[in-house]
Structure formats: C-alpha cells, structure tokens
Amino acid sequence: MRWLSRRRPVFALTAALVAVVAWTASRAEPPVPTEPPPSIPEPPQSRMTGPAGIEGLDGAALVKHFECNRCHEGDRLERPTADKACVGCHAAIH
C-alpha cells in the first residue's frame, strides 16, 4: 500500500487535468462554417404526363375516361352499371 501513497499526487493531478480538459471542451463554441451550405436543387418544372390523348382534359373528363367510379364513390360520380361495379362485385364474392 505504500506505493499508493507515493502516487496519490499523480492521481490527483491527472484527475484535475481531465476535469479541466472536459470543462474546456464543454465550453467550446461550435465552428463557424466558412462556406454556405449546399443548396437543394429545384425540381424540374414539368407537367405530369399520362397516357396519350388525355392532355388538356379536366378532372371530370379524366374521371370518366379512367372509369374511376368503378372503384370510387362520390357525389359527382355516376353509379356504374352492374357489369362494371368492381367494388360491389368483390364485396358480394367475399
């Protein structure tokens, strides 16, 4: 145990040095960037395109063209005929 008493000042000095380094590191200011952050490129401005022949159609015409009423219901959608009512058929089967 005698070796411990001789080294006690070294341990105390090491602990004090570690405490000073930790305190100094915690007070450090974050580095200031020297360059501006990279900008996010703008997405290309283009119209979405679909199958040929539907450009310029409004929403009602698209709903009619793609027969959305076969699966979806809505106030302005016509009820599909029995042979085209997919949802009703699948509900009846299951």
Image: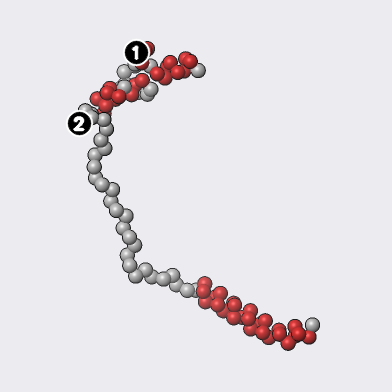
Q: Which mark is residue 81?
A: 1
Residue that protrudes farthest toward the bottom in the picture: 6
Residue farthest along the left direction in this orientation: 56
- Which quarter of the picture shows residue 30? bottom left
Q: Residue at x 25, y 35 (%)?
A: 49
Q: From the top left corner, tell me how far across and down residue 79 is, in percent.
A: 34, 16
User: What is the distance, in whole Å, between disc 1 and disc 2 at their CAs?
Assistant: 27 Å
Q: Secondary structure at mark 1?
A: loop
User: Where the N terminus falls, by quadrant?
Assistant: bottom right
Q: Quadrant of residue 40?
A: bottom left
Q: Residue at x 31, y 22 (%)?
A: 67
Residue 70, image x, y percentages: 36, 20
Residue 67 sits above or below residue 3 on the image: above
Query: Who's the residue at 59% across and 77% down the image?
Result: 19
- Residue at mark 2: 56
Identity of the residue drawn at 28% across and 22% down: 64
Give percent across and percent down for residue 43. Answer: 28, 48
Q: Which mark is residue 33?
A: none
Q: How is the image coloured?
A: secondary structure
| Residue 39 higher or lower than 25, as above or below | above
Quick check: 37 left or right of 15?
A: left
Name the spot of residue 74 as percent of width and height, x first: 35, 23
User: Total label count?
Assistant: 2
Look at the picture and state if 31 lies above or below 79. below
Q: Earlier in the sequence, mark 1 or mark 2?
A: 2
Up/down of 8 relative to 70, above or below: below
Q: Is residue 52 left or right of residue 16?
A: left
Q: Determine contact: label 1, label 2, CB under 8 Å.
A: no
* Secondary element type, mark 2: loop
Q: Is residue 55 visible?
A: yes
Instruction: Decide: few, some or many residues near mark 1? Use Cα within 10 Å; few <14, some 14-19, many ≥20.
Output: few
Residue type, mark 1 in image: Thr
